[in-house]
Image: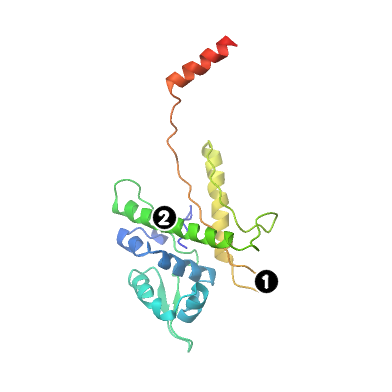
Amino acid sequence: MAHKAVTGTASDRVEDAKKIAVLAAPVRIEIVSTLEAMGGTATVAALAGQLGRPADGLYYHLRALLRAGLIEEQPGSGHGRCYRVPSARGLRLRYKPGATANAKAVGRVAASISRLAQRDFARALSHAGTVVEGPQRELWAVRLRGWVDATELAEINQLLLKLVELFLRSRPKPASKLVALQWILAPIDAKPARRAVADKSATRRRSR
């Protein structure tokens, strides 16, 4: 869902806090990400089949997304109502950090993404056939913490953007597998070592 790409202009990203808040419900995140995974357009019946939910239960959420301009409705083609994401680049959010309504809404979306990731991981882990090693590995849970400079941070963002583009290009095809990928990149305030600990370490080194 809601890919937060690192390039592009502000005009093609959703910034309004009220619109972002509409997206915060996990089922709406799933609807948007499923639309993107299906090539950007799908009927309600197809969405319901992919999500494992009754079609009637999706209309309320589809209408909310439609009113917020997060998705669009296309003319019916004899197979029921059809919806699409407005941009081929996927639905993206613009962050406005600080004490802003935007930041609060984005935080709610991130929390829902985390809950979906936890659910997906637990479900996959419960299946004995899930691949967890080798080049076809499909289940990971990792937290990395490290020091990066400006050049390395730019490289990280380029790699993440490449993943976004790879997912946006994906289409259902024979022998393909549907997967979900979520990540959070966030700066951390580094805490200086406590002086007492540092002094104690220095004393031990001198006494050796």
Circle 2 Cα neighbour tier, 10 Å, few/some/many (<14 / 14–19 / ≥20): some
Location of the C terminus by quadrant is: top right
> Which of the two residues, 94 or 198, is positioned nearer the viewer here?
198
| Residue found at the far right of this picture | 134
Q: How far across and down, in percent of the image, does residue 74 sit? A: 43, 80
- Please state if 181 lies on the left or on the right of 57 as rendered: right
The local secondary structure at tag 2 comes to: helix
- Residue that mark 2 sits on: 110
Q: How far across and down, in percent of the image, does residue 69 sit? A: 36, 69
Q: Is residue 122 above or below residue 64?
A: above
> Residue shown at 48%/64% (left/top)?
90
Marks 1/2: CA distance?
31 Å
Name the residue type under label 1. Ala
> Residue shown at 49%/71% (left/top)?
35
The local secondary structure at tag 1 comes to: loop
Q: Is residue 202 above or below residue 45?
A: above
| Residue found at the far bottom of this picture | 78
> Residue shown at 52%/18% (left/top)?
201
Q: Is residue 52 above or below residue 148?
A: below
